[in-house]
Amino acid sequence: MNHYIIGDVHGEYDMLMRLVSKIPCEAKLIFVGDFVDRGSRSVEVIRFVNVNIGCLVCIVYRRGGSE
């Protein structure tokens, strides 16, 4: 099984969906970095992560780049 690392989404839901559509369905996702911030669709990013929690290997939450 393949693992894919995705970092610094920054609320860019549409970009995240384009990226995820290119990853095989059976792959495990590892999220690191900032989920929310600059993009206008941070809520959708959080919902995606919560709905797909069973497909995720690891989620590393960071409050910001300086922490």
Image (cartoon, helix red, strand yellow):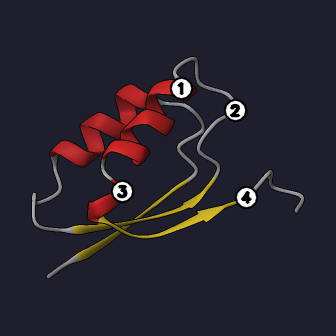
How many neighbours does mark 1 have within 10 angstroms: few (below 14), some (14-19), or many (20 or more)?
Answer: some
Would you identify the image quadrant in which residue 18 lies?
top left
Please state which amino acid type lies under the numbered disc 1. Val
Please state which amino acid type lies under the numbered disc 4. Arg
Provide the secondary structure element on which disc 1 rests: helix
- Residue plotted at (60% across, 38% down): 10
Q: CA distance from mark 1 to mark 3?
A: 15 Å
- Residue plotted at (25% across, 47% down): 20
Q: Is 29 displayed left or right of 30 in the figure?
A: left
How many neighbours does mark 2 have within 10 angstroms: few (below 14), some (14-19), or many (20 or more)?
Answer: some
Is residue 28 positioned above or below 36 on the image? below
User: For mark 3, what is the residue?
Assistant: 53
User: For mark 4, what is the residue?
Assistant: 62
Please state which amino acid type lies under the numbered disc 2. Asp
- Lower position in the chain sequence, tag 2 or tag 3: 2
- Lower position in the chain sequence, tag 4 or tag 2: 2
Q: Is 13 displayed left or right of 21 in the figure?
A: right
Between circles 3 and 4, the one closer to the viewer is: 3
- Residue plotted at (16% across, 49% down): 22
Provide the secondary structure element on which disc 4 rests: loop
User: For mark 1, what is the residue?
Assistant: 43
* Residue 58 x %, y %: 46, 72
Q: Which mark is residue 37?
A: 2
| Marks 1 and 3 close (CB-CB < 8 Å) | no
Between circles 2 and 3, the one closer to the viewer is: 3
| Marks 3 and 4 close (CB-CB < 8 Å) | no
| Marks 2 and 1 close (CB-CB < 8 Å) | no
Q: CA distance from mark 2 to mark 1?
A: 10 Å
